[in-house]
Amino acid sequence: MVAYQTAYLKAHFPKEFMAALLSSVMDTNEKVGFYIEECRRMGIRVLPPDINASQARFTVDKDGIRFGLAAVKNVGENAINNILQARKEGRFTSLVDFCSRVDMRVVNKRVIESLIKCGAFDSTGWRRSQLLAVLDTAIEVAASRQRDLASGQLGLFGEDVMTGGDEIEPPAIDELPQELLLAMEKEMTGFYVTGHPLDRFRGKMARFPTINKVLSGAYTDGQRLRVAGLIVSVKRLITKKGDTMCFAAVEDFTGQIEVIVFPRLFYEVNKLLVLDAAVVVTGRLSVNDEEIKLLADSINSLEDLQPEVRIKIDDSHADSATFAALQKILMRHHGQAVVYLHLTGRKQVIKTEQQYWVAPSPEFINAVESLLGIGAVQVI
């Protein structure tokens, strides 16, 4: 009954269901990361924290699911309550407006800096680079406003001086590089919120099992497989023989796995074993009662990984004339993408020789599908 109710809620109220699910696992980074990726798979946007929209926990927003302020590092319960209370007076229009209306003894510089880094001030219209550049000045201006208000100082016609004209102009500086913005989001929330360094590799990564699936027990001890992801930690060790080996953590959209690189391979791939490198790891799985690790046999750059082309050939096209025509198409569009022929009738997969590898252009796909039918070509 519980399984049925859960499935019903996920099917008919997907945003509400996933927001509640994310809130229930806020203290477990691995699970939050997995469910964020599930939201993306379902077509639900996960929006960054926002001083003008976020509550303490994950909530449903008209455009998707809004990150909760409680998920932001250094932002405690007292600070959140103070921000939400101040917001009842209306939207925060700027950094100075925010600093003027909250209690700076509770919502201090460290809290505000964390909120800026994770994108919570993006709704003010300023770049994060600009916000960070003027943070100290904004705090000083706001403190001055609060002192004037506390002293009872009023404007000429009785209005608060806090509504005066001492707003700060945005400095003329460019936004920070995308890689740095994502790194700051990860630092402050534990996740990449507005994007992911691996987004441009999603097509390539589709051919590999997700790390979450590997960790779920779907594979057995000693089984060979490949995973792809970012290197998020590297620890080098010296063996008793004086050789160097490495323990690296590789993370994809769904989870993280420890990869062991023994000395023989370490010296071959040392240049790839750096933080934030996108890699493909081939190896054997080591499974015991406590943990699952991957013993690496080879490590390659995900950037350099060539796409694969899979061509389905059903029984109606499995004749010599069709194969001859296909051979000509492959030769005419020669490139570096590996070509696999899927003979559906025989349930057989053939990896072609390198002379038949292709550059998978739209012209190539059209030529093959004209011969074998729409949907016969899949580029991964």
Image (cartoon, grey):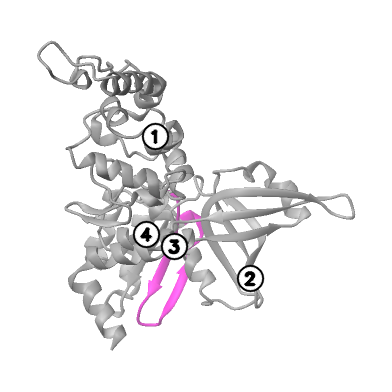
The circle on residue 207 is: 3
- Magenta stretch contains residue 305: no
Q: How many residues crowd mark 2 within 10 Å: few (<14), some (14–19), many (20+)?
A: few
Q: Disc 1 designates what residue?
A: 112
At label 3, the amino acid type is Arg
Label 4 SS: helix
Which of the labelled discs sits on residue 37, or is there none? 4
Query: In which quadrant of the rendered image does the N terminus lie?
Result: bottom left
Q: Are marks 1 and 4 in contact (CB under 8 Å)?
A: no
At x 41% / y 64%, what residue is drawn?
Answer: 25
Give the magenta range. 334-355
> Which kind of residue does numbered mark 2 sit on?
Glu
Circle 1 residues within 10 Å: few <14, some 14–19, many ≥20? many
- Write the residue at 43% across / 54% down: 204
Nearest-to-viewer mark from 1 and 3: 1
Residue sitting nearer the eye, 285 or 150 = 150
Residue at screen point 22% across, 74% down: 9
